[in-house]
Image: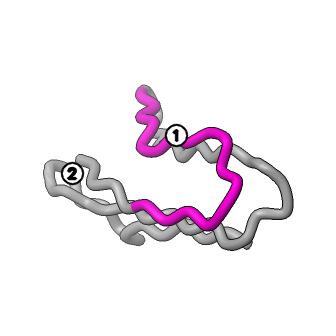
Amino acid sequence: IYLVTVTSQAVGGSTETLCAHVHEPSEPLSIVVTLRTDNHNLTILQQGSIKKDFYKCVPFK
């Protein structure tokens, strides 16, 4: 089971927060969260080899 939350309307120039939660993975997994715009990709969270419960919040602009 996994959940990723982020503000529904990000405002340019302000700091937003992304939170990711993985609960009891049945096998090791990796997660990558990338914010995409027309001309830019920004990887906000990258975590490999998740084998147990994982929770992390990351601020981004």
Tag 2: amino acid: Gly
Looking at the picture, how far across and down is residue 14, in whole percent? 15, 56
Residue 49 drawn in magenta = yes
Residue located 19% across and 56% down the image: 15
Q: CA distance from mark 1 to mark 2?
A: 22 Å
Left or right: where 17 falls relative to 4: left
| Label ID, residue 46 | 1
- Comparing labels 1 and 2, the label whose residue is closer to the camera: 1
Residue located 70% across and 54% down the image: 51
Crowd tier of the residue under label 1, counting other residues whose Cα lies within 10 Å: few below 14, some 14–19, many 20 or above: few
Left or right: where 28 falls relative to 46: right
Q: Is residue 5 above or below residue 33?
A: below
Tag 1: amino acid: Gln
| Label ID, residue 12 | 2
Q: Nearer the viewer, residue 48 or 7?
A: 48
For the view shown, which residue lies furthest in the top direction?
A: 39
Looking at marks 1 and 2 on the same chain, the residue that comes earlier in the sequence is marked by 2
First to last magenta residue range: 40-56
Q: Quadrant of the N terminus?
A: bottom right
Q: Nearer the viewer, residue 45 or 56?
A: 56
Residue located 26% across and 60% down the image: 16
Secondary structure predominantly adopted by residues drawn in magenta:
strand
Please identify the quarter of the rendering in which residue 6 is found. Answer: bottom left
